[in-house]
Image: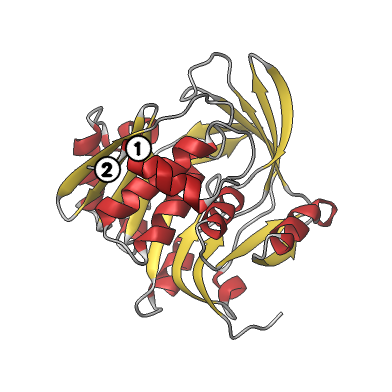
């Protein structure tokens, strides 16, 4: 497919066929960071595009993007990424991850025909997006470039995903404008339990803005300042995809708003998303009302 269309945000990451195990039972969900992020961006009125890899048998995901008005550029692979997310307790930040198959590496050439104001990688494990990708994307002038820590410190050993040191961290971060992490990942990489200190650690390596999620809310670190937002969710039934929804909504709004305001949108959208399994599907009007109620200043 060739395109000359201009997109707001390109979300790049492999589709994941998720099995989610909780104390309440087992559910099967179409996952992948780009899936959650792109649908959130679309609901907020943006024109996103998805770059992904998956098995042809899971083509319903591509059709779902198209039905939602989201262009998708898939590469079909022998296996989709097959992930199991196990929450043994009701602590939504504590989970075990297992992978029985992967869809391989997203290459810079997959974006050759795509023009976007921002490029976000929502990878699930190491090897899905590599350093060369960021070097190539950084050559694009004026593009906002973002990545998620999870796609680099999660390493597949057998069928288990384990945290391992990220030797290319400084090299990758030197190319980024925005970095997304959660509190557990941040502590692992920086040694800091204090999320503000962890955010500053990352910022000193290159990214001008840090999005750091934790069980109670969201921190946006930008221009040397810290902005905190609490999540206000009635349930955590849709915890999977929290961070991806957060970064998708933040980057979308960041194209037109300063960090502090974009953070409000990200906190509101994420609060509403975690109440429900699957992708974010609430209206912009509802999000605006939520911001007025909880984040007026």
- Residue at (54, 52) in percent of width and height: 40
- Residue at (48, 22) in percent of width and height: 94
Please indicate, yes or no, whether residue 151 appears anywhere in the rendered image. Answer: no
The residue most toward the right is 57
Q: Quadrant of the N terminus?
A: bottom right
Q: Is residue 53 left or right of residue 200?
A: right
Judging from the image, what secondary structure is the residue with disc 2 in? loop
Query: Taking 93 as reference, is 100 above or below it?
Result: below
The colour style of the image is: secondary structure
Decide which of 11, 95 is in the foreground and name it: 11
Q: Is residue 42 left or right of residue 134?
A: right
Q: Quadrant of the C terminus?
A: top left
Task: Identify the residue under disc 1.
Answer: 293
- Residue at (80, 56) in percent of width and height: 59
Q: CA distance from mark 1 to mark 2?
A: 7 Å
Query: Taking 220 as reference, is 239 above or below it?
Result: above
Query: Taking 226 as reference, is 205 above or below it?
Result: below
- Coordinates of residue 253 in the picture (x, y in percent): 39, 59
Decide which of 26, 216 is in the foreground and name it: 216
Please indicate, yes or no, whether residue 119 appears anywhere in the rendered image. Answer: yes
Task: Identify the residue under disc 2.
Answer: 296
Q: Is residue 18 left or right of residue 34?
A: right
Judging from the image, what secondary structure is the residue with disc 1 in? helix
Decide which of 63, 67 is in the foreground and name it: 67
Q: Is there a contact, CB below 8 Å, between mark 1 and mark 2?
A: yes
């Amino acid at each position: 497919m060739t395109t000359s269309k201009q997109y707001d945000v390109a979300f790049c990451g492999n589709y994941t066929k998720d099995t989610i195990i909780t104390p309440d039972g087992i559910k099967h969900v179409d996952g992948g960071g780009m899936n959650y992020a792109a649908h959130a961006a679309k609901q907020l009125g943006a024109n996103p595009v998805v770059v992904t890899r998956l098995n042809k048998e899971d083509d319903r995901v591509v059709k779902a993007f198209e039905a939602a008005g989201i262009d998708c550029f898939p590469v079909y692979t022998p296996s989709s990424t097959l992930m199991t997310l196990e929450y043994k307790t009701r602590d939504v930040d504590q989970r075990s991850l297992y992978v029985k198959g992967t869809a391989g590496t997203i290459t810079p050439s997959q974006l050759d025909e795509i023009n976007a104001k921002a490029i976000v990688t929502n990878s699930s494990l190491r090897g899905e997006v590599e350093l060369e990708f960021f070097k190539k994307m950084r050559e694009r002038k004026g593009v906002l470039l973002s990545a998620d820590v999870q796609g680099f410190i999660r390493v597949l050993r057998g069928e288990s995903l384990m945290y391992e040191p990220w030797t290319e961290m400084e090299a990758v971060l030197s190319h980024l404008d925005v970095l997304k992490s959660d509190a557990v990942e941040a502590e692992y990489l920086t040694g800091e339990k204090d999320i503000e200190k962890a955010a500053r650690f990352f910022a000193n390596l290159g990214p001008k803005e840090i999005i750091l999620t934790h069980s109670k809310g969201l921190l946006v670190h930008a221009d040397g300042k810290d902005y905190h937002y609490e999540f206000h969710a009635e349930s955590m039934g849709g915890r999977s995809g929290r961070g991806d929804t957060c970064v998708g909504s933040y980057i979308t709004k960041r194209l037109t708003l300063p960090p502090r305001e974009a953070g409000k949108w990200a906190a509101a959208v994420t609060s509403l998303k975690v109440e429900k399994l699957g992708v974010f599907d609430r209206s912009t009007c509802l999000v605006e009302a939520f911001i007025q109620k909880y984040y007026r200043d």
